[in-house]
Amino acid sequence: MGDGTPDVLNARSPALNYRAPHPQLELMMTPYVNGEISHWMKASGSVDQQDGPRAAGRRAGALPDEEQDFVIVGGGLTGLWAAYYAAAEQPDAKITVLEAEEVGYGASGRNGGWLSPLIPGNRGVYAKAARRRGQDGAAAIASFQRAMETAIDDTLRVLEDEGINADQHRGGHLRVATTPAAMKRLEATHTADLAHGYYAQDLELLDADAVRKRINISPALGGLLTRTTARVDPAKLVHGLAAAVENKGARILEGTRATRITPHAVTTSRGIVRGKTILTCVEAYSGQIDSDARGLDARDVIPVNSSMIVTQQLPDSAWEQVGWQGYECLGDAAHTFVYAQRTADGRIAIGGRGTPYAFNSGTPGLGTVDARTVRTLHERLQLFFPGVQFEVEHAWRGAIGVTRDWCAGITFDPATRIGVVRGFAGHGVTATHLAARTLIDRAAGRETPLTQLPWNDHDSGRWEPEPLRWIGVHGMYRLFGIADRWEESRHSQNTSLIARFGSRLAGLE
């Protein structure tokens, strides 16, 4: 949810080092907030202390009684960006966004705040898909990569134009290696990135000293800096975008859960909303909607959990020891990687590990996290920054949408005029913007460079039925956790064969 599997694959599944909860485990630290959507949403005033999220929130107006030009299902970043660009392109269009809870309730308000250029999927898989269409696979991936980088530029431009303060800061992202095997993976990633559309000036391999000059991570052996990434506060981003959408004349209806989608109509918990074009942007919650539209079956995309904690504000003395003056987004090159940011108000938010998947595609609700996962993330901070005292203030988890091949896809049926986006697999902060603009192009019937990108109409296959998919997902993460412990305990020079087997099990190779 941060925006892996071995980085050379560029598939980067969420870093969740699963271990079964221990009933006697107690986390010895100051009491912290648990769940309540996220720290970001709580800090933004989005959560009522007694009643939880504003399920019947301030945007609970009457359903429209006339047909809409666009009905957009999902009030996360994809749906809001789609509404924004539809309204900008057609100022007189009737546009309604339907949200089951409140804007940002899903991954859009819970993520790690990485506005990064990482493609939401496996480059090799997308290249094969492009070749099947008669395209040059390498050129298609390079175009996809450049489109992701442009999407970062465009997002930051819109924030400036609309006066949205999302604590955005373009400090890049730094992935560090703490074992020789991880450093080899970063070197391979650097080579692969240069071959697949990254500009040389945007990437830099760093030795241990260069890493520590930026962020004083004790066990770091080296790192890879990607300069184009920006940090954001997810809740400020989603709420600012929602306000911009409303300023352009679109309506947002919270507390309006879509239950069925058919051509030109969405059945909701409050009645039916009719629309000429329906865009479905619900990501991990896709399987909860009844529809014949491609991509919305419970086995097309599953919700995979990622957990986060945020510390209390650190004193100046701690920041003098930690460094991190460039506000880079921070991750590591372990198989069960973590992702982190230094927040604008002087905290560290770090995420990744936790229970990966709930049986039969259960979703996380308000996002309560088990004590073992909180402890695991806290220990990762202590490993990176020994001697610094960290107190956890808030813990939460969210769900990302994952397809069977871990690649995102966009579909639009001109006959039914139903569009679907799903499967960002933790790389949605940037990809939502690109996907929304692509959907608007496809809805307009235009052939553009965006509609030629290889995630258009990509077929990811289907997940196995239960209990096979529960066994498979949990088995994969167990293998990645074992591989990390193997590499760390032996200071291994090469990636563990166990991790490679886990990648094959997941369909990532």
Image (spheres, rainbow, N blue to C red):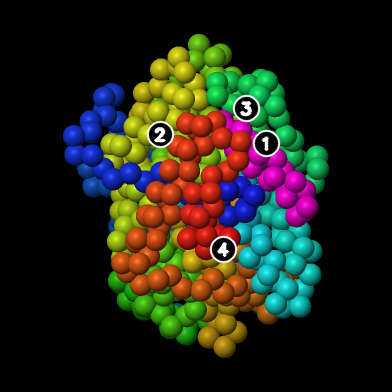
Image location (x, y in percent) of residue 265:
43, 81
For label 4, the residue is 407
Which label's residue is closer to the chain start, 2 or 3?
Answer: 3
Gap in Å between the C-alphas at discs 1 and 3?
A: 11 Å
Secondary structure, mark 2, is helix
Which type of secondary structure does the marked residue at label 1 adopt?
Answer: strand
Cα distance between the residues tagged 3 and 4: 31 Å
Amino acid type, mark 2: Leu
Q: Is residue 112 visible?
A: no
**Foreground tag (1 vs 3):** 3
Residue 205 appears in the rendering: yes
Report if residue 196 lies within the magenta region: yes
Q: Are marks 1 and 4 in contact (CB under 8 Å)?
A: no
Seen as rendered, the residue at the extreme top is 317
User: Which residue lies under the disc numbered 2?
Assistant: 377
Q: Are marks 3 and 4 in contact (CB under 8 Å)?
A: no
Q: Dividing the image into 4 quarters, which one contains the C terminus?
A: bottom right
Vertical arrangement, residue 447 with respect to residue 164, above or below: below
Question: Front-most of 393 and 41?
Answer: 393
Tell me which residue sits at (38%, 52%) in the image: 356
* Disc sitting over residue 224 in the figure: 1
**Picture quarter containing residue 230?**
top right
Provide the secondary structure element on which disc 4 rests: loop
Cα separation, mark 4 vs mark 2, equals: 27 Å
* Image-quadrant location for residue 90: bottom right
Magenta span of residues: 176-198
Q: Amino acid at mark 4?
A: Cys
Q: Residue at x 77, y 73 (%)?
A: 135
Other-residue count near label 3 (Cα within 10 Å), few / some / many at <14 / 14–19 / ≥20: many
Q: Is residue 251 above or below residue 169?
A: below
Residue on which the image places disc 3: 221
